[in-house]
Image: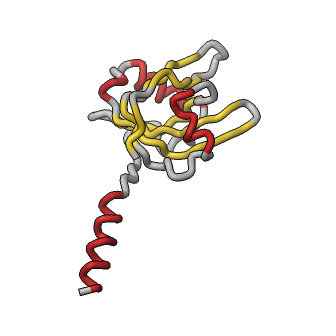
Amino acid sequence: MRLIALFSVLLLLACGCKRHSCHLLPEEGKHAHGSPPYTAAVARHLAATDQATLDCYIADYEEGSTGQYIWVDFHSSTWCATAKADITNADKLAHVKELGGVSYIAAGLDGFRVTIDSSTGNYNFIFADLDHIVD
């Protein structure tokens, strides 16, 4: 009986994991995530897509001398990509920043939106809004 209960708990835990992978952009495999060509491709896809239709998940957290960032898996019905978004000024993600992303990897981001800044000649994704985190 204990074995069945333990198996049931483990099965529920395994089903609860929402790890999403992303490999649909043609640039995948040709260019590393975060490289200028890959980031430009992500920017083109994001600009051509209504961000409200995307499913977004935290893939990783990064902090450096220039700010705080999350790597986000963007999923649409026809493509997906991973990109780094600047969350330095994102008050709605304060807890994620405080914890350094710990326990938020693979969490859903409902209503996550970014702006695309290309003023420096590169494409930078900057947090714009978030409805809530689904963990």
Q: Could you tell me which residue is drawn at 34 percent across and 64 percent down?
A: 14
Q: How many numbered discs, if any?
A: 0
Q: Which corner quadrant holds the N terminus?
A: bottom left
In-image side of 91 versus 26 (left or right): right
Q: Which one is nearer the viewer's eye here, 66 or 99?
A: 99
Q: List x then y, in percent, for residue 119.
A: 63, 12
The picture places residue 79, in percent across and down from the top left corner, at 34, 35
Q: Is residue 98 above or below residue 11?
A: above
Does residue 76 appear in this view? Answer: yes
| Rendering coords of residue 35 (x, y %) | 60, 35
Residue nearest the observer in this picture, 132 or 50: 132
- Report the residue at 51% width, 29% height from top: 92
Give percent across and percent down for residue 44: 44, 22
Q: Residue at x 33, y 72 (%)?
A: 10
Query: Quadrant of residue 62 in the image?
Result: top right
* Colour pattern: secondary structure
> Which quadrant of the view contains residue 81?
top left
* Image side of residue 3 versus residue 18, left or right: left
Q: Is residue 25 visible?
A: no
User: In the picture provided, is 100 more to the left or to the right than 24?
Assistant: right
Q: Nearer the viewer, residue 88 or 85?
A: 88
Q: Is residue 122 above or below residue 32?
A: above
Residue at left offset 33%, top offset 24%: 52
Q: For the view shown, which residue lies furthest in the top direction? A: 119
